[in-house]
């Protein structure tokens, strides 16, 4: 019934914060974007990749 594909479980998304500054993450397309530092975390098969480079 969903008009858009559910990229990530909303309950999971609510628990996630940026690992760098612990700011909220915003869902943009198939990625999560930190509302503070702007880092982008890809989501693969519903699992966000929270690895930080550098
Ligand atoms: Zn951040």
Image (tube, grey):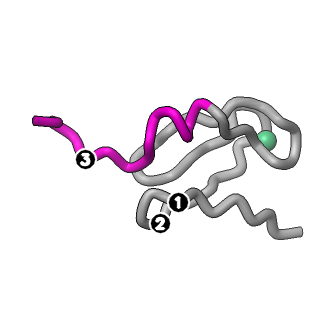
User: Helix or strand or loop: what does disc 1 sit on?
Assistant: strand
Q: Position of residue 5 (x, y in %)?
A: 25, 47
Figure disc tally: 3
Which quadrant would residue 18 be assigned to in this image? top right
**In screen coordinates, is 15 left or right of 51?**
left
Mark 1 C-beta closer than 8 Å to ligand 1: no
Location of mark 2 (residue):
44
Residue shown at the point (47%, 66%) measured from the top left: 44
Magenta highlight range: 1-14
Residue shown at the point (89%, 69%) measured from the top left: 54
Location of mark 3 (residue):
5
Q: Position of residue 40 (x, y in %)?
A: 64, 53
User: Helix or strand or loop: what does disc 2 sit on?
Assistant: strand
Residue shown at the point (87%, 39%) measured from the top left: 21
Q: Position of residue 22 (x, y in %)?
A: 83, 36
Q: Give the class, few, some or many, for how many residues have Cα within 10 Å of label 3's Cα (few <14, many ≥20).
A: few
Magenta span includes 53: no
**In screen coordinates, is 25 left or right of 44?**
right
Distance in Å between CA atoms under marks 2 and 3: 13 Å
Distance in Å between CA atoms under marks 3 and 1: 14 Å
Q: Give the class, few, some or many, for how many residues have Cα within 10 Å of label 2's Cα (few <14, many ≥20).
A: few
Magenta portion: prevailing SS class: loop
User: Helix or strand or loop: what does disc 3 sit on?
Assistant: loop
Contact, mark 2 vs mark 1 (Cβ under 8 Å): yes
Split into 4 quadrants, where in the image is the N terminus?
Answer: top left
Of residue 38 and residue 48, the one placed in the foreground of this image is 48
């Amino acid at each position: 019934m969903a008009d858009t594909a559910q990229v990530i479980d909303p309950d999971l998304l609510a628990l996630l914060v940026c690992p760098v500054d612990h700011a909220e993450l915003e869902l943009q397309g198939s990625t999560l974007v930190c509302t503070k530092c702007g880092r982008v975390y890809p989501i693969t098969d519903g699992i966000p990749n929270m690895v930080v480079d550098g």
